Image: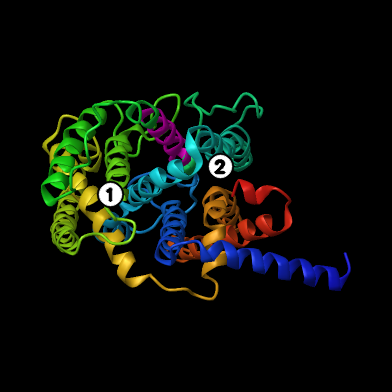
């Protein structure tokens, strides 16, 4: 390819990106970038946490954050981490009815199978086991052959961070089936206005459902053969449903101001309560009891967490509508790369952690390097694939 041809190709790509961005809601794209970058960074830091081992590298880490840093992160940061994924489900719920209306049932299902199903299958059945084996085998944690260790010691499919994609696919297909039935039903009722009472009832349903599931699958644990984070399903299904309902009530443009203010107040109270609860659980060495089981800490935890999940998601969405509704120079490119970055994150986070492993540095130094480097590398690689690999843009 000549230099002139390359410049022409880049100009066409830039024009296509500009057309794509012109059809989007700026705040929603900016929010997506912030959320996914935050999730990637948190995963990078979790690789060096010993209090809760919920990331691939944490079980193999060579250094661990000091107890003081871990407790600080647990008390201050984690309350907000509880509703980051939930917010993604809320946004997905908001966009789903519009996509279905525009495409129709068959095209909607085909699109979801392509954009969610294909990446999920490729990642879960090829990339994740390969990356995990490449990490664990040299360190002696997976001593057998690749095929012997394919399902890991737990003999289950490891979905990694793409559990979100798999669950969203199930919710999307469920929505398509519900629409096919409800659109033909003569008894379909008009949508009720979402009020503060609606959100409170939603949280009241999520709490006992989460408690019941966590008797078998505690928070952060393996979730059966599928490993689809069953312990998060009640909250994720609830906010996805709120998004579907809210899309018919103008939530995509703006959350009602009164509802947003009350959600902010309740989120603040719940965040303080969660910080206090985690501090107590940490001091009693009972974090596992809070994450699931017949224990008063587990009961209080799900009540506070459901409040954070429901009201926190609504509040953050309203805050994004007010604060992030603008176009940035790199905004369209970052937004276009966000989904791919989410899928590629494990590769770069683990590679960076391995690269730093021989260095005699404390976890307090390694964790930020892995977190920041993982964000940059994931977004850059996703952008490269979209621009350079034919057909990949249909999926990413």
Tell me which residue sits at (41%, 47%) in the image: 98
Q: Position of residue 193 (x, y in %)?
A: 18, 47
Q: Residue at x 20, y 33 (%)?
A: 211
| Front residue of 385 and 70 | 385
Q: Is residue 32 left or right of residue 308?
A: right
Distance Cα–Cα, label 1 vs label 2: 24 Å
Residue 359 seen by the camera = no
Rendered location of residue 280, percent (x, y): 15, 50
Chain part drawn in magenta: 163-178
- Secondary structure beneath label 1: helix
Disc 1: which residue: 246
Which percent across, then down, holds residue 104?
48, 37
Secondary element at tag 2: helix
102 shown above or below 323: above
Q: Which residue is mark 2?
A: 115
Q: Which residue does the image show at 59% across and 27% down from the upper left?
A: 149
Q: Earlier in the sequence, mark 1 or mark 2?
A: 2
Bin the neighbour count of mark 1 within 10 Å (Cα to Cα): few under 14, some 14-19, many 20 and up. Answer: many
Please tell me in which quadrant of the rendered image residue 231 appears: top left
The residue closer to the viewer here, 298 or 105, is 105
Q: Which mark is residue 316?
A: none
Q: Is residue 100 above or below residue 177?
A: below
């Amino acid at each position: 390819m000549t230099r002139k041809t390359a410049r022409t190709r880049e100009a066409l790509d830039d024009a296509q990106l500009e057309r794509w961005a012109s059809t989007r809601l700026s705040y929603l794209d900016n929010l997506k970038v912030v959320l996914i970058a935050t999730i990637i960074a948190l995963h990078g830091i979790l690789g060096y946490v010993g209090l809760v081992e919920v990331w691939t590298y944490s079980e193999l880490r060579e250094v661990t954050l000091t107890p003081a840093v871990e407790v600080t992160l647990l008390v201050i940061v984690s309350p907000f981490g509880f509703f980051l994924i939930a917010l993604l489900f809320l946004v997905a719920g908001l966009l789903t009815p519009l996509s279905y209306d525009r495409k129709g049932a068959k095209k909607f299902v085909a699109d979801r199978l392509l954009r969610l199903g294909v990446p999920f299958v490729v990642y879960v059945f090829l990339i994740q086991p390969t990356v995990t084996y490449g990490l664990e085998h040299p360190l002696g944690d997976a001593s057998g052959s690749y095929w012997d260790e394919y399902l890991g010691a737990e003999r289950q499919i490891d979905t990694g961070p793409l559990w979100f994609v798999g669950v969203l696919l199930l919710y999307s297909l469920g929505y398509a089936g519900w629409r096919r039935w409800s659109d033909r039903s003569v008894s379909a009722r008009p949508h009720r206005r979402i009020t503060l009472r609606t959100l409170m009832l939603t949280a009241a349903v999520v709490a006992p459902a989460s408690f019941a599931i966590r008797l078998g699958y505690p928070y952060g644990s393996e979730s059966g053969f599928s490993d689809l984070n069953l312990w998060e399903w009640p909250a994720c299904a609830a906010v996805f449903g709120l998004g579907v309902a809210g899309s018919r009530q103008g939530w995509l443009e703006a959350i009602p101001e009164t509802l947003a203010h009350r959600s902010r107040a309740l989120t603040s109270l719940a965040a303080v309560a969660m910080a206090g609860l985690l501090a107590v659980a940490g001091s009693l060495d009972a974090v596992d009891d809070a994450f699931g089981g017949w224990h008063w800490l587990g009961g209080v935890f799900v009540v506070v967490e459901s409040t954070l999940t429901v009201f926190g998601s609504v509040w953050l969405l309203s805050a994004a509508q007010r604060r992030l509704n603008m176009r940035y120079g790199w905004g369209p490119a970052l937004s276009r790369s966000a989904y791919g970055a989410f899928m590629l994150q494990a590769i770069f986070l683990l590679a960076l952690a391995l690269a730093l492993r021989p260095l005699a540095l404390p976890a307090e130094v390694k964790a930020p390097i892995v977190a920041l480097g993982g964000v940059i590398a994931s977004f850059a690689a996703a952008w490269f694939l979209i621009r350079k690999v034919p057909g990949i843009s249909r999926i990413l």
